Image (cartoon, rainbow, N blue to C red):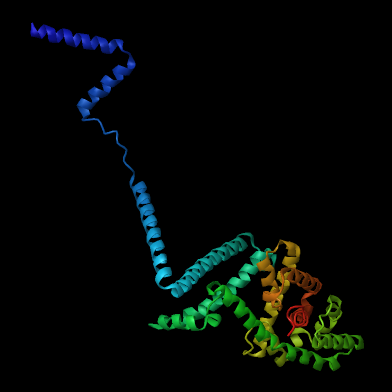
């Protein structure tokens, strides 16, 4: 009797499974396979090892940021002066790293498309020029820190002589203004000697008209009068060959012109001449690129930096006056040929020494 009841129950269950459609039959098949192959897997999701690593890295980064913020608050509260130096140093490292990555991208693009330096845009050319100077200054620090335990002495020297050993990224805003004034005072010391050298060459010039124009130009500079663009361009022939051409400058002229360009004057004359040629050529190429870009596209800081590079102490001059001066400089520079770059070199003195706001 009991066996018949079990048999009827099984028949009833089998019939309901058949009449309930394919969904139930699929469940029965899965159930049977589960009985054969083992228990069904849990529905709970598991992350892959790669996702676990990413989540761990995100956790570590988050915790590091929290600890770093606490450390900054601790320094700011207990050691405020040291915190200022620490902030400037870390910010300078980030800026230098960003400059290095940008310079690397520019170099890679030059190699990929076979582009020369003078074919770059103005901002790319200026970035490479400034980054090269920064790297040279940093290399000196790297060399003197090679001996054992010398790095402790280097940190002390960096603190005591920031202008001589550190680049602009590691200067405070006040230091930047003060150091630019100091550098301009150094190159300003060479201006009287450069004008004296020009006066000494006047009798050597064969053309009487050029002698008169150069005499007038030197007189204006000594009287404190700013020369006009035409006053300088009329002397192009004078500076293309003997006695004021780049290849005909005397050793004393090379030394004082190097000082005016903030280049070391303590080198043999042939090295001074080569450096002055390269430096003046780069400025000439920058001027052409800037004329193509337009001064109106430059920011205030870019305008002041461009003026300072060309001999004008722009730290205390209004932006509109800097733009006016830079526009007149471009008129002169873009009118010169490669053989006349000695005039552009002397123009650093002739066109900047008496500009409004820079007279002493």
Q: Nearer the viewer, residue 23 or 352?
A: 352
Question: Which quarter of the figure is the C terminus placed in?
Answer: bottom right
Q: Quadrant of residue 121?
A: bottom right
Is residue 176 in view from this perspective?
yes
Is residue 262 in view from this perspective?
no
Horizontal arrangement in the rendering, residue 39 relative to residue 187 (left or right): left
Is 189 placed above or below 299 here?
Answer: below
Residue 164, position in %: x, y? 55, 82
Of all residues, the one furthest to the left in this rendering is 1
Residue 255, position in %: x, y? 68, 89
Task: Tell me the residue at 81%/92% (across/down).
Answer: 199
Is 12 placed above or below 276 here?
Answer: above
Of all residues, the one furthest to the front in this rendering is 77
Horizontal arrangement in the rendering, residue 114 relative to residue 142 (left or right): right
Question: Which quarter of the figure is the N terminus placed in?
Answer: top left
Residue 22, position in %: x, y? 33, 16
Q: Quadrant of residue 129?
A: bottom right
Is 91 placed above or below 310 here?
Answer: above
């Amino acid at each position: 009797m009991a066996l018949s009841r079990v048999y009827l129950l099984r028949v009833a269950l089998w019939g309901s499974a058949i009449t309930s459609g394919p969904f139930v039959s699929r469940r029965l098949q899965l159930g049977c396979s589960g009985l054969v192959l083992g228990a069904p897997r849990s529905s709970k999701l598991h992350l892959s090892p790669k996702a676990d690593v990413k989540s761990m890295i995100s956790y570590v980064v988050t915790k590091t940021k929290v600890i770093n913020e606490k450390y900054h608050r601790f320094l700011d509260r207990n050691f405020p002066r040291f915190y200022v130096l620490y902030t400037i140093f870390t910010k300078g490292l980030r800026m230098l790293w960003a400059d290095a990555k940008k310079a690397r991208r520019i170099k890679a693009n030059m190699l990929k498309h076979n582009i020369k330096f003078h074919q770059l845009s103005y901002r790319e050319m200026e970035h490479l020029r400034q980054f090269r100077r920064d790297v040279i200054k940093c290399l000196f620090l790297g060399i003197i820190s090679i001996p054992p335990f010398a790095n402790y002495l280097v940190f002390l020297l960096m603190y005591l002589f920031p202008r001589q050993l550190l680049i602009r990224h590691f200067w405070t805003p006040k230091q930047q203004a003060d150091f630019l004034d100091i550098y301009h005072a150094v190159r300003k010391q060479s201006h009287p000697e450069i004008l004296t050298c020009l006066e000494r060459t006047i009798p050597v010039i064969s053309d009487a008209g050029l002698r008169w124009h150069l005499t007038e130009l030197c007189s204006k500079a000594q009287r404190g009068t700013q020369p006009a663009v035409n006053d300088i361009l009329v002397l192009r022939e004078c500076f293309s060959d003997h006695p004021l051409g780049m290849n005909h400058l005397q050793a004393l002229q090379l030394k004082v012109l190097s000082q005016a360009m903030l280049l070391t004057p303590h080198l043999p004359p042939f090295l001074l001449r080569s450096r002055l040629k390269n430096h003046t050529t780069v400025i000439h190429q920058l001027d052409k690129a800037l004329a193509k870009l337009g001064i109106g596209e430059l920011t205030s800081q870019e305008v002041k930096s461009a003026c300072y590079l060309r001999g004008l102490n722009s730290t205390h001059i209004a932006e509109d006056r800097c733009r006016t001066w830079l526009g007149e400089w471009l008129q002169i520079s873009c009118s010169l040929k490669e053989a006349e770059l000695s005039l552009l070199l002397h123009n650093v003195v002739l066109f900047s020494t008496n500009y409004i706001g820079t007279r002493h």
